[in-house]
Image (tube, coloured by chain):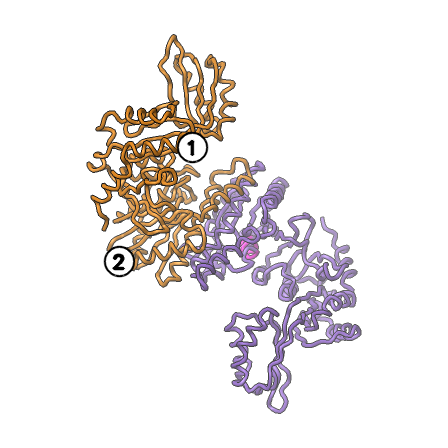
Chain colours: A purple, B orange
Amino acid sequence: MRLIVQKYGGTSVGTPERIRKAAERIVQTQREGARVVAVISAMAGETDNLIRLAHEMSPQPDAREMDVLLATGERAACALTAMAVNELGAKAVSLSGADAGILTDRAHTRARIANISARQINDLLGEDYIVIVAGFQGQTPEGETTTLGRGGSDLTAIALAGALNADSCQIYTDVDGVFTCDPRVVGDATKMTEIAYDELLEMAGSGSKVMQSRAVEFAKKFGIEFEVRSSFTGAPGTIAKEETANMEDVVIRGVSIERKQAKLTVDDVGDVPGVAARIFSAIAAGNIVVDMIVQSVGKHGSTDISFTIHENDLPSAEKLLQPVMKQVKASGLVASPHVAKLSVVGIGMRSHSGVASRLFECLGRAGINIQLISTSEIKIAVIIDEKDVDLAAQITHKEFGLASLVANAAAMQPLP
Amino acid sequence: MRLIVQKYGGTSVGTPERIRKAAERIVQTQREGARVVAVISAMAGETDNLIRLAHEMSPQPDAREMDVLLATGERAACALTAMAVNELGAKAVSLSGADAGILTDRAHTRARIANISARQINDLLGEDYIVIVAGFQGQTPEGETTTLGRGGSDLTAIALAGALNADSCQIYTDVDGVFTCDPRVVGDATKMTEIAYDELLEMAGSGSKVMQSRAVEFAKKFGIEFEVRSSFTGAPGTIAKEETANMEDVVIRGVSIERKQAKLTVDDVGDVPGVAARIFSAIAAGNIVVDMIVQSVGKHGSTDISFTIHENDLPSAEKLLQPVMKQVKASGLVASPHVAKLSVVGIGMRSHSGVASRLFECLGRAGINIQLISTSEIKIAVIIDEKDVDLAAQITHKEFGLASLVANAAAMQPLP
């Protein structure tokens, strides 16, 4: 019998009505002849609510207690889902991460899965139970509750699918799958039938937050295929998998945008070792996430360092950098809020040349100025004015023929 | 070093501010030179909220899942309390009922404590930890989460105090202790310094819901003294203990009232075996709690049976009794809403005669009609019109000299 792991995110179990819908899908999956393990997140808003309470107790809540606290959100949602499944006439049992045999290291609030002992789940599946597992959590060898960090429920589902050797891992969420671009920005954006892990990773790092990078990295490492699909429509979603020759035929597979970015440039710093370290240690001390970093070629012994952060972090970043400016002998600090990042992603880029110039020309024709450029093997990202980003996404999407290409690819691979 | 078990109820941890206050008291207790175990309830309203969600999933939610769900409320409150204690510079660790070694039977949602293995708590106390234990829960020998039913946190605290051989068990709540009568009704009602377990049991069963009866019964069975005190004032409360000679000197120790009662009388039923069983099986089928039951002396082969229920249950009770009326050959069913129960309680009653007549005369002088009478060894309860109940409580409280007597008793036993 097929074994299917399903994961329902916070919005998919955000209300009693939605929990019932998820339960219906779970039971339906079993009735179609599969064994089912469902991984459940906390009801939407619950984790944020618990974090808010914790911070009312302490500016830096004890990490062990934070894990005990946060783990309750998923346990409650699991119990409610199990009740709904039972109400539909199926047999369900809810398990905490610990019950499910998920063993982690001791890094509270950001634990890594060390091992999964699937015996308990396998026993229950053997007795025809639908097993409902609390996502996002595990326990240490000493039996202390741990959590896996934000997005940890995706990781739980993928890791369980691997440990149980599941036939399918379905990540139910509030979007239909991974699109060639945000459909709210690009009207003819198309759902991809499949995506390579690396492409999904680059998309996730570029503002298309379908999945947390950590879960995708785990899937890639162990070669666990999974499908991102909508809990509302039931339509087939996007399958994340190893890259295929098919994918490589397409130069660019997606365009992703990230708004509300800010660019900071430290001018004329000494082109000597240790300068970048000083700047970014200062930023890191404020727990500010830095995205792109670009250092220009040094001239006359000095250079410029530019980087991007979220716009909301700009005031703290400027404050943190003031004392560093003298240390690195910078001539000035230029802050540019209201910028956005546009990235084009595709593993085909590796074997196709001229992608960058095609992107820059396309943007140039529309009079859109490029402020920073950063590239990886399968991604080109540019920083532009935030006001230009919708237009930029639309013309880029068209330039690389994404709507038609993916539609063709989908046509080539009809779904069952 | 002294060992103190403290229990904080839902209202005492109902807001972040109140959790911080509870944490301050816990830390203060440790700094005064005691080892502290604190038992914590779910934040006020949380349990009801979870029950509501469960009933949206299923009219009769699976009992195992109900326990998993409800147990999260106390665990979350415990973690928050531990964070607040840590923030004050003390060392705290939160434990679930299972972690704390509380072993129960398998009766989900109303489990009984079978055994407590105090090793884990003792180890932690030995390392100077303040141990924060989730009330209301335990686990079966198979490791399944169970809950102890409403008021179960009191039971957890008392059972832990017994298992740990604690020097003191303090039940923090939103009242100052046990009063001779409800101070909102009787202005000079006085806080009792001590109360016998049996008296507290009769008071609890008579509408003074300071503690759930089950916890008091447990304390009585194992002779565990505890003190009911306010989490807001910090003043000494009321100590529940074995009866003392001192207590027996006082005829009546408290007056309690219960409003919103309804009286039902089944007239002229056959005075034969099995009649009462039929009536009360029908009522029990509707999950309606019956309080007083009075059967009059039979004449000419027939008798009347009267009983009281909560006023809200009256419509369902009448409906449930209709089909029974013919079976028991009753001539009629008389329903009287808007009645109340007044009880006088005192272990001294055992060795003092004339208490009943003194109560009846007192009420009679005020023109208050008594509709039903029920007595136990240490309690006399009467049903009267609800509109008379405040006056009845005031004159009864005065008749038995409760304000002055208890004030004297308190003066005789100055607190440390």
**Which quarter of the figure is the N terminus of chain B placed in?**
bottom left
Host chain of mark 2 = B
Give the magenta-colored segment's residue range. Answer: A154-160
Mark 2 is surrounded, within 10 Å at the Cα level, by few (under 14), some (14 to 19) or many (20 or more) other residues, namely: few
Disc on res. A326: none
B26 and B113: which is toward the camera = B26
**Amino acid type shown at disc 2:** Gly
What kind of element bears circle 1? strand
Host chain of mark 1 = B
Most frequent secondary structure within the magenta stretch: helix
Q: Identify residue for label 1.
A: B259
What kind of element bears circle 2? loop
Mark 1 is surrounded, within 10 Å at the Cα level, by few (under 14), some (14 to 19) or many (20 or more) other residues, namely: many
From the image, state whether disc 2 or disc 1 is nearer to you: 1
How far across and down, in percent of the image, does residue A395 sit?
A: 77, 67
Circles 2 and 1: CB atoms closer than 8 Å: no
B255 and B119: which is toward the camera = B255
